[in-house]
């Protein structure tokens, strides 16, 4: 049998082509095969079945003798290279190696058709042994070793691609000898199978270089190819430059995770894998018939897509779309993309949308591929009375938690109409008793309201009754959708669940800002099930007026809110004062850092509480990533108090001047969820993981 040996590692070299000489010598010792060798003149891995189109090829020659009988340092020694063939060396028993300044596929072509040999036509092409495994479709589709074998098939010659998996760069002489011994016997066996089964064009063989490798005991198994996928194999370096950076560790991890019988699994189990292949693309049924094209917009069927269905004039449309586009996402706006989502199995979508537009069916059916910017169940955080219950239950079992002192004492009131307030206070008798002591100021918050609607402060039961009477008078019962923004009212559906909290009467005031009360808006990202990050760029939102202690209004029927509410949406007609936290004047860097540490600690404890106490009303999902707006008050002693948690926070609070904060936020969000899309990305330094 006349065999042609080729490879993609180039001529003999201790580092780049360390295995081939053992195999060549074993063939000479153990068989009567006629051997021709044609290899690239330099290392040509990762080139597949490529040719250098239009290039004139040149050959040179090297010569070797048997060098692997015993361990020595000159196993890969050769004579040459020579521009011409050296007949006198061949006559002395040297093995000739033809070097071609081209690709492995070109070497197969030259060896089959043009190498002047007295051995006759080539019966079998053996490509390898390759320096490294070729298991899994990622390696196989790129492999020059397999490319040379496939090239041989296209010229009518059957082939075997032989690869050695190494787990250490220190190559054992004995293991390599055993690998060569096994490989020669296995090639002889597979050559017979190629004759017996004409439908097989080539075999891919992977041999692990392990100490236990043994002809008698190592299992040799037929196996299909592991189907795996790359993330990008290039890393952006800036200025339009990209570095070669394939994540081989991720490929290895995927192989370890898959328990399916494949070539990779056989190697993991210290066996030798053999995969029969057909060197041809095959059409896939059931596609047939005529294709009719129309004017519909083409939509992606694979890859990572940001489907953004919020209005294009939305404040956050550009920050969101640009952040994901930088990570290689295709940006789409047409929701019909989801119509054939189930069939497009290579498509991954982050659907950035309003809560009502989330496709609940896709969330359940395709959690690895359909991602949304919200959890479905998170009332334990965003409803004020649920939040209060969550925290109270958690601190009862965790008295050392940071939440113990970080949440104002709270009471729950359920009031349908103002006339029933007295009955509700009878049920909340502890609250009634505290109010009647007259020692504290209290704040009333409708549980489901936002943008400051319905928030009131009071000192007495009479003032609380007056508040509810005003609610009843202010709500138009003929139009339940009227939210009476002008008088900061509440809609009828909100006149049921309320919480009453001890008002924080001693907030930190800064003379640099006319002693106006402020709260901190902290953006918190919750990813999957469950990682929680605090965004470093905090906003400081100031009240419209200077702060005056509420005790000064004790005798008023309803206490004034001037100087007490810091919600910027209540300051219509004015320029709300919003300052980046780290730029605040009147606070030292050390004080700011201490406040930020408290915020991180409390936030981590809060999400731990939500995920452990109320598993019905807070259900993290693997395919969700939600941004919450968490509000904190800073007291004059620099302690922080958690006020509330908002879903779909109002990002417009930054205004135009501070919009870069929102751009940076969504850049950080995209980087934090990149792992879900198998994208390599540096974790943003602006995101601090707290859970």
Image: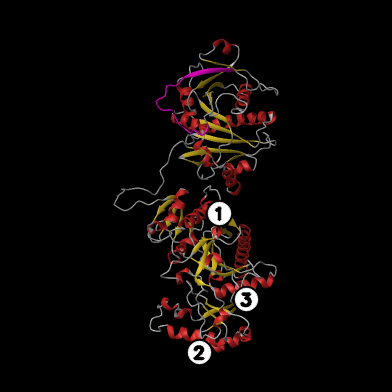
The residue singled out by tag 2 in the image is 419
* Residue in front for this viewpoint, 77 or 183: 77
**Residue 536 seen in the figure:** yes
SS for callout 3: loop
Q: Position of residue 377 (x, y in %)?
A: 53, 68
Q: Nearer the viewer, residue 534 or 202?
A: 534
Query: Which image quadrant is residue 206 in?
Result: top right
Give coordinates of residue 376: x percent, y percent.
Answer: 51, 66
State the CA–CA distance, disc 1 to disc 2.
50 Å
Alpha carbons under labels 1 and 3: distance apart:
32 Å
Q: Can residue 259 be seen in this view?
A: no
Name the residue carrying label 3: 409
Which contiguous range is marked in magenta? 45-63
Mark 1 neighbour density, 10 Å: few (under 14) some (14–19) many (20 or more): some
Quarter of the picture holding the N terminus: top right
Q: Is residue 52 magenta?
A: yes
Secondary structure at badge 1 equals loop
* Among numbered discs 1 and 3, the one appearing first in the sequence: 3
| SS of the residue under disc 2 | helix
């Amino acid at each position: 049998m006349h065999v042609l040996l080729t490879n993609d590692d180039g001529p003999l070299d201790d580092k780049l082509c360390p295995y081939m000489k053992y195999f060549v010598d074993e063939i000479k010792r153990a068989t009567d095969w006629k051997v021709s060798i044609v290899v690239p003149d330099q290392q040509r891995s990762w080139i597949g079945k490529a040719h250098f189109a239009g290039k004139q090829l040149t050959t040179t020659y090297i010569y070797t003798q048997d060098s692997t009988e015993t361990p020595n340092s000159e196993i890969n020694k050769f004579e040459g290279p020579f521009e011409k063939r050296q007949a006198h060396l061949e006559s002395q028993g040297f093995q000739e190696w033809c070097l071609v300044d081209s690709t492995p596929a070109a070497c197969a072509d030259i060896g089959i058709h043009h190498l002047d040999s007295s051995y006759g036509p080539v019966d079998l092409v053996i490509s390898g042994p390759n320096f490294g495994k070729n298991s899994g479709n990622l390696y196989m589709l790129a492999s020059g070793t397999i490319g040379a074998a496939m090239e041989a098939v296209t010229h009518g010659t059957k082939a075997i691609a032989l690869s050695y998996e190494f787990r250490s760069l220190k190559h054992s002489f004995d293991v390599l000898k055993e690998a060569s011994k096994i490989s020669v016997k296995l090639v002889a066996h597979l050559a017979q199978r190629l004759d017996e089964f004409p439908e097989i064009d080539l075999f891919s063989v992977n041999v692990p270089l392990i100490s236990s490798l043994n002809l008698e005991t190592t299992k040799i198994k037929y196996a299909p190819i592991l189907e795996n996928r790359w993330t990008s194999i290039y890393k952006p370096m800036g200025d339009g430059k990209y570095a070669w950076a394939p994540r081989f560790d991720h490929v290895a991890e995927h192989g370890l995770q898959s328990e399916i019988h494949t070539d990779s699994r056989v190697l993991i189990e210290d066996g030798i894998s053999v995969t029969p292949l057909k060197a041809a693309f095959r059409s896939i049924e059931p596609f047939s018939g005529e294709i009719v094209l129309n004017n519909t917009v083409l939509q992606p069927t694979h890859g990572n897509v940001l489907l953004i269905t919020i209005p294009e004039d939305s404040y956050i449309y550009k920050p969101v779309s640009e952040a994901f586009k930088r990570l290689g996402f295709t940006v789409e706006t047409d929701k019909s993309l989801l119509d054939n989502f189930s069939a497009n199995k290579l498509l991954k979508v982050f659907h950035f949308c309003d809560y009502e537009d989330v496709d609940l069916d896709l969330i359940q059916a395709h959690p690895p591929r359909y991602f949304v910017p919200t959890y479905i169940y998170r009332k334990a955080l965003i409803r004020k009375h649920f939040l209060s219950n969550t925290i109270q239950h958690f601190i009862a079992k965790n008295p050392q938690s940071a939440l113990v002192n970080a949440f104002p004492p709270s009471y729950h009131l359920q009031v349908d109409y103002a006339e029933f307030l007295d009955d509700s206070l009878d049920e909340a008798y502890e609250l009634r008793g505290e109010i009647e002591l007259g020692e504290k100021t209290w704040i009333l918050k409708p549980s489901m309201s936002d943008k400051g609607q319905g928030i009131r402060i009071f000192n007495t039961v009479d003032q609380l009754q007056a508040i509810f009477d005003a609610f009843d008078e202010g709500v138009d019962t003929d139009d339940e959708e009227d939210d009476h923004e002008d008088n900061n009212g509440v809609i009828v559906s909100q006149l049921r669940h309320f919480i009453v909290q001890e008002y924080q009467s001693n907030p930190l005031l800064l003379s640099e800002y006319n002693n106006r009360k402020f709260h901190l808006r902290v953006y918190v990202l919750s990813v999957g099930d469950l990682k929680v990050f605090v965004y470093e760029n905090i906003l400081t939102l100031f009240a419209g007026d200077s702060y005056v202690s509420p005790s000064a209004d004790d005798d008023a029927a309803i206490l004034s809110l001037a100087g007490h509410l810091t919600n910027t949406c209540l300051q219509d007609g004015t320029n709300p004062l919003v300052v980046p936290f780290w730029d605040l004047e009147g606070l030292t860097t050390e004080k700011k850092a201490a406040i930020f540490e408290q915020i991180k600690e409390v936030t981590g404890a809060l999400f731990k509480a939500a995920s452990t106490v109320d598993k019905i009303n807070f259900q993290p999902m693997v395919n969700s990533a939600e941004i919450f707006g968490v509000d904190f008050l800073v007291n004059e002693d620099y302690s922080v108090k958690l006020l509330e948690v908002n879903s779909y926070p109002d990002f417009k609070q930054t205004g135009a001047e501070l919009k870069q904060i929102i751009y940076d936020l969504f850049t950080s969000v995209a980087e934090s969820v990149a792992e879900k899309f198998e994208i390599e990305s540096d974790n943003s330094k602006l995101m601090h993981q707290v859970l």
